Image (spheres, rainbow, N blue to C red):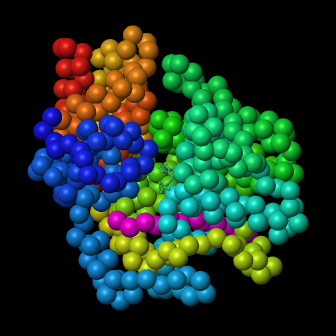
Amino acid sequence: MTFEYIKDNYSVWHPFTTIRLMSEYGIEIVGGKGIYLEDSNGKSYINGFSGLSLILGTKNEEIIDAIYQQLNKLPYCSMFSMTNLPARKLAEKLVEITPKGLDKVVFTTSGSESVEAAIKISRQFFYIQNQKQKKHIISLQDSYHGTLYGAFSASGIYSKEEHEIYGPVLPGFSFIDSSFYNSSQNISYVSATKLEDEIKEVGKENVSAFIMEPVLGAGGVIIPPKGYISAVYEICKKYNILFILDESATGFGRTGTMFAMEHEGVTPDILILSKAINGGCLPLGAVLVSNNIFNQFNDSDSILAHGTSQSGNPTSCAASLKTIEIIQRDNLVVNARIVGDYFINLCSELIEYDIVSDVRGIGLMIIIELTNKNQPLTTEETFNIYLKLLGEGLITHYKKNRIGFFPPLTISKEEAKVTYEIIKKVISEYEGR
Ligand SMILES: Cc1ncc(COP(=O)(O)O)c(C=O)c1O
């Protein structure tokens, strides 16, 4: 390995990271350009894990300029009884680019915080209507909605041990099966009626919302079968339950449409956005709601008791306005679809290797699953592959037996081909071919 190890006198405690591995194998990123990142040794890497945020590449001069201009005008402004131009314009823009039926925007600072706000909104929406017991939230077993306690409680992905360590989690949450596919990966055997069963079990008078990701990202890029989202939406309507769609990871082009919900043509009651909203440059999240929800609050003078000092930060919002302008002007959504399809097709050829058991994805949200003699690779084995890819100049995301590839949306076909060749070389060498 050529990278400089982070050793003693290192004071950062990293999230979701084994400290021992980080101190041995961590790299320090100092800069980069386009889809590339550069470390402190001058080594260059393809950024295959943009945090699902850095969609415009490492250093976008137009975003830098937009941030600089805003810092010069008004770097900060509280949203408590005041507004600011970038926040107002961004709210208008988000309403314009999302499907009809999402009319008002609550600004937050992250995906996790957006989930907290969405949970509060859904509970208060019913409280205002004197349905005070409608509190329960249902979500999917493999879902990830974030790290704060509400989002943690709504995420099906956390292990029993994590529940034991951090618990008690919040009461009033339950999960339904998300194993949509059988082992041959093509037949849906979990139907949306699981949601109906759960609603009946909890009692429709107790349930306020069902929350899901349109593609279960952290759960392993699990794409619900066609028709699933429409079916759960209908069930929510039938039982007077709000449908919350968490597009923190999928929003702004990642799946080859501006929002993943467009694949099914479903508009939720509440939409959660974050990450790519401003190209990952500054913390920002948003929750969009329908006029129907907003008017319940407005008509009864009910305040939403949610907000932080950084809600609607004008600099974060200015960066977002420029990001959306660039996505639209440069047709990055189409690029994500074309390059994504191309890359998934290339990687599908890797199935001929014994250790590759599945390649799946949508747009530029792609997972390669690794197996040895029908047993999923251990996290340690997968980590070794991750390290080899890193050595070859490719940063990926690894989890369990999966290698994830989520590059900036600006990636070209040529760059996708180079990425594929690196993956092929590493897998080939791993198998001793
Ligand atoms: C679907 C989804 N929701 C929420 C979050 C949490 O977002 P943040 O990390 O900005 O808090 C994530 C992050 O990965 C996510 O993928």
Q: Residue at image x 70%, y 63%? A: 120
**How many numbered markers are drawn?**
0
Q: Residue at image x 70%, y 50%? A: 170
- Residue 117: image quadrant is bottom right
What is the x, y in percent for residue 139?
A: 66, 44
Confirm whether the magenta stretch covers residue 293: no
194 over 245 or under it: above or below: above
Quarter of the image where the C terminus is located: top left
Quarter of the image where the N terminus is located: top left
Q: Nearer the viewer, residue 341 or 213?
A: 213
Q: In the image, is 257 to the left or to the right of 33?
A: right
What is the x, y in percent for residue 31?
A: 19, 58
Confirm whether the magenta stretch covers residue 282: yes
Q: In the image, is 201 to the left or to the right of 280?
A: right
What is the x, y in percent for residue 192?
A: 70, 36
173 over 88 or under it: above or below: above
Q: Residue at image x 36%, y 62%? A: 279
Instruction: Confirm whether residue 420 shows in the render.
Output: no
What is the x, y in percent for residue 299?
A: 79, 80
Instruction: Confirm whether residue 61 shows in the render.
Output: yes
Q: Residue at image x 40%, y 22%? A: 378
Q: In the image, is 172 to the left or to the right of 254?
A: right
61 over 426 or under it: above or below: below
Q: Nearer the viewer, residue 136 or 216?
A: 136
Q: Residue furthest front?
A: 9
The boundaries of the magenta stretch are: 281-292
